Image (cartoon, grey):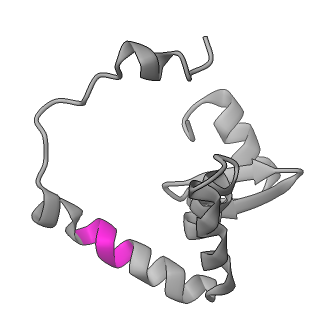
Amino acid sequence: SNQSEAGKRLLSQHNISTPESVLLVEEDKCYSNTSAVFRILGHLGFPWNISLVFLLIPPALRDFVYRFISARRYRWWGRRSTCRVATKEEMEKFLP
């Protein structure tokens, strides 16, 4: 979380004043927005790692499309009044 002590420290170390919705710190490099998303997906293995090909698209264009979709996602797919609870099988994938 950006608001946690560790998050605040990482933001400070990487000189980020306005935190993005998605940040990835990997080997002392900080990635944001779609660069972070596609790098995270790349770590998930097949078929998710195929998305790494999108890193070939210029970041400004990728981030524009990302913001365009995120601004309209509730209108297109709706909004839930409660968060979905992970199943037992899904919970096994999380760290304790």
Pick the residue in front: 60 or 57: 57
- Tell me if residue 10 comes above or below residue 60 in the rendering: above
- Tell me if residue 70 comes above or below residue 53 in the rendering: above
Q: Residue furthest front?
A: 46
Residue 2 image position (x, y, % from top left) = 57, 41
Pick the residue in front: 88 or 15: 88
> Which residue sits at x=81%, y=50%?
26
As drawn, is 52 to the left or to the right of 83? right
> Which residue sits at x=56%, y=68%?
34
Residue 61 image position (x, y, % from top left) = 51, 88
> Which residue sits at x=38%, y=74%?
67
State the image quarter where residue 8 is shown. Answer: top right
State the image quarter where residue 29 is shown. Answer: bottom right
Which quadrant of the rendered structure holds the C terminus? top right
Does 68 appear in magenta? yes
Number of numbered discs overlaid on the protein picture = 0
Residue 60 image position (x, y, % from top left) = 56, 86
Q: Which residues are magenta?
A: 67-71
- Tell me if residue 39 comes above or below residue 81 in the rendering: below
Does 83 appear in magenta? no
Pick the residue in front: 65 or 6: 65
Q: Main secondary structure of the magenta part?
A: helix
> Which residue sits at x=89%, y=50%?
27
Residue 18 image position (x, y, % from top left) = 56, 60
Which quadrant of the rendered structure holds the N terminus? top right
As drawn, is 19 to the left or to the right of 72? right
Q: Can I make out residue 15 in this image?
A: no
